[in-house]
Each structure stands twice: as structure tokens, then as C-alpha cells.
Image (cartoon, helix red, strand yellow):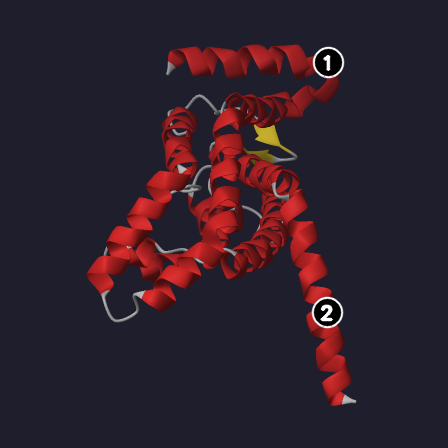
Amino acid sequence: MSVFASLVEWLADLLQPLFAGTATAAAIILFTALVRLAIHPLSRASARGQKARTRIAPQLAALRKKHAKNPERLRKEVTALHAREKVSPFAGILPSLLQAPAFFLMYHLFSGGRMTGHELFGAPLGNHWADALADGGLLGPAGRVYLALFALVAAVATFTYRRTRRQLAAQPLDLGEQAPGMGTLTKIMPLLSFGTLVTVAVVPLAAALYVVTSTTWTAVERSLLFRDQGEKEARAERPKKGVAAATRA
């Protein structure tokens, strides 16, 4: 953990001439970007897996229709299809899980007292949102910093929510047929992006910067990785809207 702390401190010293008192906050943001850049190959692999699932979605739909009355046969056929097409039913989940250790490592690092004396526009990096409310209130210096973070997180979460819903609609997940409870998980998955708001509210500001930067990176990264899929979905939606408008007329 001292290696990561030393890296953040080195980046802060490097950025000091440009960012002065906010150099440590800038260093955390840059450090987060470096971490995300390091695991970018995992994100690309995840995107390829999810695109492959979209490709075989018509075959999965045919299997569900053919074996609707035989769940055991359906499960075997779906498993065989995934194996034949070399598609993992958990594509898109594992990279997110692999990012968790980095967050917890940063959380403990930023909660260890190393952020004492470092601020972001008057908000101590080692304090929490509750501290900001107690010291200056919602519109105090620290409170305004948190309001800006909440606004950014809400915008990113809304964007992610809409994109995830479109992806799940275009790419039926058959995890519910693979393991108990996974079907429910896929239903609530689009809402998980809003959980970042809670995280930012309860962790130290330094860790919140890590979370917000990582979340924003994810939204932009996935938007670029799935850009071709989004264009296809948009083209598919236009005829539907035209038919709906003609029906209302």
C-alpha cells in the first residue's frame, strides 16, 4: 500500500506547479486514470464478450422457444451454445469485480490519515460529506464541492442507466437460466449506477474522487467500446418510432 501512497505523493509533487493547493486531488484523479488505463484490456475483452452475446441472441431466443417446456434441456443447449461460440455468460461482470480490489485499496489508503492537510477548494480530502454539512452546511465551501460531485455522478449515472437498459433490451441475459437469482440481478443492474451517489456520500472525499473519476471513465469507455452497437440500436429504434407516429395519426 505504501507503494501506491508514494506514487500519489510523487504525482502531487509533479502537479504542484500547475494545481498548487489542489495538487493532491489532481494527483488522485490522475492516479485513478492510470489504474483504469492499466485494466483497459479487461474492458475491451468484456466488450467483445458482450457483443458476442448480442450476436447469438437470436439463437438463444430460438432455443428458449424450442425447449420452453423442458428447462433442463434448455439449460444444456444454452451451455453448449455458449461453449461452441466461445461466449461467457458472465461477460461484463468479471471486469467490474476485478476493479473492486483497487477501490478498497484506495479507500484504506485515503482513510489512513495521509490526506490530513490536503484540500480541494476548501474541502479536506480526509473528511466525509457529514463533516462538510457540519462545517459550513450544504452551501459551504466543502458542501459546494460535494454538490458538484453529486451533480456529476447523477449525470453519469443517468447516462449509464439509459445505456444499460438499452443494452439489456437488445441483449437478453440468460443468467437466470444458469444460476438462481441471476435473473433478478439483471433486472436491477441498470439501477446500480445510482449507488455511486451513496458511496460518494459515505467515503472520504479523496476516495470519492477516485470513485467519481473511475465511474466517469467507465461511462465514456463503454460508450466508445459499444459505439457501433449504439448506432445499430438507434437505427432500429427509428422505424419503431415512425410506426408509432403513423399509428397515432
Amino acid type assigned to the residue bearing label 2 in the image: Pro
Task: Sort mark 1 into few (<14), some (14-19) or many (20+) by Cα contacts within 10 Å.
Answer: few
Residue labelled with disc 2: 239
Which residue is rendered at x = 67% and y = 44% of the image? 228
Q: Nearer the viewer, residue 201 or 129?
A: 201
Answer yes or no: is residue 23 visible: yes
Q: Nearer the viewer, residue 199 or 173?
A: 173
Q: Position of residue 179 (x, y in %)?
A: 25, 53
Residue labelled with disc 1: 17
Which residue is rendered at x = 59% and y = 41% of the image? 222
Q: Name the residue at the left extreme.
A: 72
Q: Nearer the viewer, residue 136 or 151?
A: 151
Q: Position of residue 85 (x, y in %)?
A: 41, 40
Which residue is rendered at x = 36% and y = 56% of the image? 174
Q: Is residue 195 above or below residue 100?
A: below
Q: Is residue 105 above or below residue 86?
A: above
Secondary element at image label 1: helix
Q: Is residue 30 above or below residue 79?
A: above
Residue 236 lies in quadrant: bottom right
Answer yes or no: is residue 188 visible: no
Tag nearer the camera, 2 or 1: 2
Measured in 3D between alpha carbons, the distance from the residue under mark 2 to the one under mark 1, in whole angstroms, is 54 Å
